[in-house]
Image (cartoon, rainbow, N blue to C red):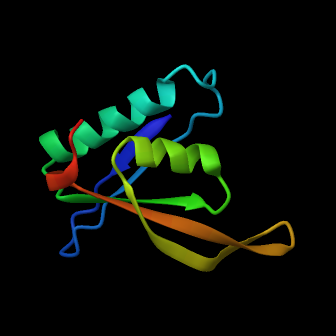
Amino acid sequence: MAYIADPQNEEEIRSASFETRLLPWRKGYGTESLNAIIRFAFDSLGYRKLTATVTAGNIASKRLLLKSGFRQKGVIRQSYYLNGEWRDDWVFGLLADDYHG
């Protein structure tokens, strides 16, 4: 599943999400889906940057984002509470000027 939310506001905050747990792994579907979202956001919608958050420790998602041109920007410590513990998120960013897809 993939979507882009586009709330029209002055901060230009947009959100994109995709989920690959139902797709066969290691066949390129995640990369293909993410790159389609990126191209659509930059080329069709005119976004200038994208931000992604991933649960810290999710190496597969980190690898996917880095492969698609995102750069790791930092960590949001104790981002959310799940199953009795606080979880961190990794933050990634990609500027339209830096995308070579």
Q: Quadrant of residue 32?
A: top left
Left or right of 78, for residue 13: left
Residue in the picture at 14% in, 40% down: 44
Residue in the picture at 28% in, 55% down: 6
Q: Position of residue 59 (x, y in %)?
A: 63, 49
Residue in the picture at 48% in, 73% down: 74
Total marks placed: 0
Q: Is residue 60 above or below residue 32?
A: below
Left or right of 69, for residue 42: left
Q: Position of residue 95 (x, y in %)?
A: 22, 58
Q: Position of residue 21 (x, y in %)?
A: 65, 34
Q: Position of residue 62 (x, y in %)?
A: 53, 51
Q: Nearer the viewer, residue 89 or 14?
A: 89
Quadrant containing the C terminus in the rendered view: top left
Q: Is residue 99 above or below residue 39?
A: below
Q: Nearer the viewer, residue 20 or 62?
A: 62
Residue in the picture at 17% in, 58% down: 48
Residue found at the far right of this picture: 84
Q: Nearer the viewer, residue 13 or 63?
A: 63
